[in-house]
Amino acid sequence: MTWPDHPPARVAARRETYFFLSYAHSVPLSVAPRPDTEYWVSRFFQDLCAAVQRVATRGGGRDAGFFDGQVSPGADFRQTLTEALSLAHVFVPLHSPNYFRNAWALGERESFRSRLTRLAPAQAERHLLPVLWLPLPSWGDRPETTQALDLVPDADDRADYAENGLRALCKLSAYRRQYESVLAALAERIVTVTESQPLARSRAAPLASHPVAEGDGPALVVTALTDHAPWRPYAGQHELAVADYVAATAERLGLPTRVVDLPAARVLAPESPTVVLVDAATGAAAARAALDGLPRWVVPLVIATGHARGVSAPESIAGTLQDAGFPRILPARAIDEFERYAPLLVTEARKQFLRHGPVDPPAGPAVPRPSLRPARPPDSGAGLPPVRSFDTMRGKDER
């Protein structure tokens, strides 16, 4: 899979990188302040870039590394990360229990692997250098875990790394020496692989959410109530339509997602968490009529890019939808408000669905609950003594 003779200008202008850092998100990067998990990933990325730059001998045409914290929130994440995966020489996944449940992270891995198909298996595996970010349960051991631990030559440092994971070593000053040891070993391997066996520029397969065998329930449904298709109220600031942006936010959190039109959402919503993005130009009465009959767990967000701060029409729409039984979220006018609300929409839609959604058991024969009581015929209780209440038993004892 070779790069075309004339790659896209935006890709051709970008520099190659020694490594691409992949990890499982807890919240999207547009949220500020970032949570503890993302902070330490960013800190580790910066430390690893510095370590690679110290070791590199022929890095004049390459940047040290790439991770998605460098992507502006308004960019097309899928396209931007696919391009970055096409220019990296080593893939560094931060393994944690959540990594193997995160469809987006696994999609990054599969996208990079698509560039290795022409290499011998042993040679291809050199370009994947996993890191044990958080300890995995004993029943979740994988070959990549052994590969991550074998990277560290010192037995004592390797034991601390295996027991605590690299995030703890990064956070705690008591483990600073062990952290530096793992960091140096990883940087040395990245540079060795890149400079002795560089990958030719090649197009990675488009980044897609890799299916996870044990999903976290039904897919999130995202739709829009507007006369514009695709709807880009923040054109010039966002490459993505607003529905696609919310879907990308959910997918980076590891949630399967579908972007559909409103009639399809009406079919799917009774069995799915659902977000509806409402164009404020629709008006309160029309918005209520359009969403009438949708389940109460559907979460609407009114987007009002053309309405100034003092204009109450968007709030009126949100209040009307609240009166109809939907959760209320303040309208989004500016792009920073929309970016801040996107993860809240995903979280709220999941929460509302779990609270109010269907709880019917799956179709099929009922399975009796296990019991430790000895089996007996249904009428075998006829000869048993009657059950006495606590008060009856206490009265007898007092006499």
Image (cartoon, helix red, strand yellow):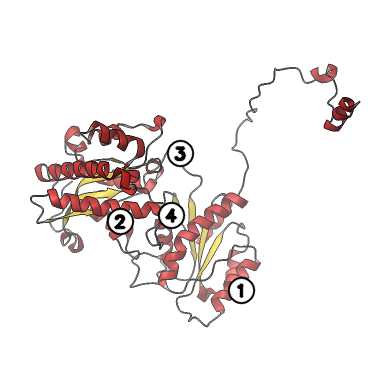
Looking at marks 3 and 1 on the same chain, the residue that comes earlier in the sequence is marked by 3
Residue 399 picture location, percent across and down: 91, 25
Which amino acid lies under the numbered mark 2 shown in the image of this protein?
Asp
Looking at marks 2 and 3 on the same chain, the residue that comes earlier in the sequence is marked by 2
Residue 181 picture location, percent across and down: 22, 41
**Residue 32, label in figure:** none
**Distance between the alpha carbons at the discs numbered 3 and 1:** 41 Å
* Residue labelled with disc 4: 250
Report the front residue among 199 and 204.
199
Looking at marks 1 and 2 on the same chain, the residue that comes earlier in the sequence is marked by 2
| Disc 1 element | helix
Question: Residue 372: which quarter of the image?
Answer: top right
Q: Is residue 137 left or right of residue 383?
A: left
Looking at marks 4 and 1 on the same chain, the residue that comes earlier in the sequence is marked by 4
Q: Residue at x 28, y 60 (%)?
A: 70
**Residue 68, label in figure:** 2
| Disc 4 element | helix
* Residue labelled with disc 1: 285
Q: Within 10 Å of the Cα at label 4, are there few (<14), some (14-19), or many (20+) other Cα atoms?
A: many
Which amino acid lies under the numbered mark 3 shown in the image of this protein?
Glu
Report the front residue among 27 and 298.
27
Q: Is residue 120 visible?
A: no
Question: Residue 288: which quarter of the image?
Answer: bottom right
Which amino acid lies under the numbered mark 1 shown in the image of this protein?
Ala
Q: Within 10 Å of the Cα at label 2, are there few (<14), some (14-19), or many (20+) other Cα atoms?
A: some
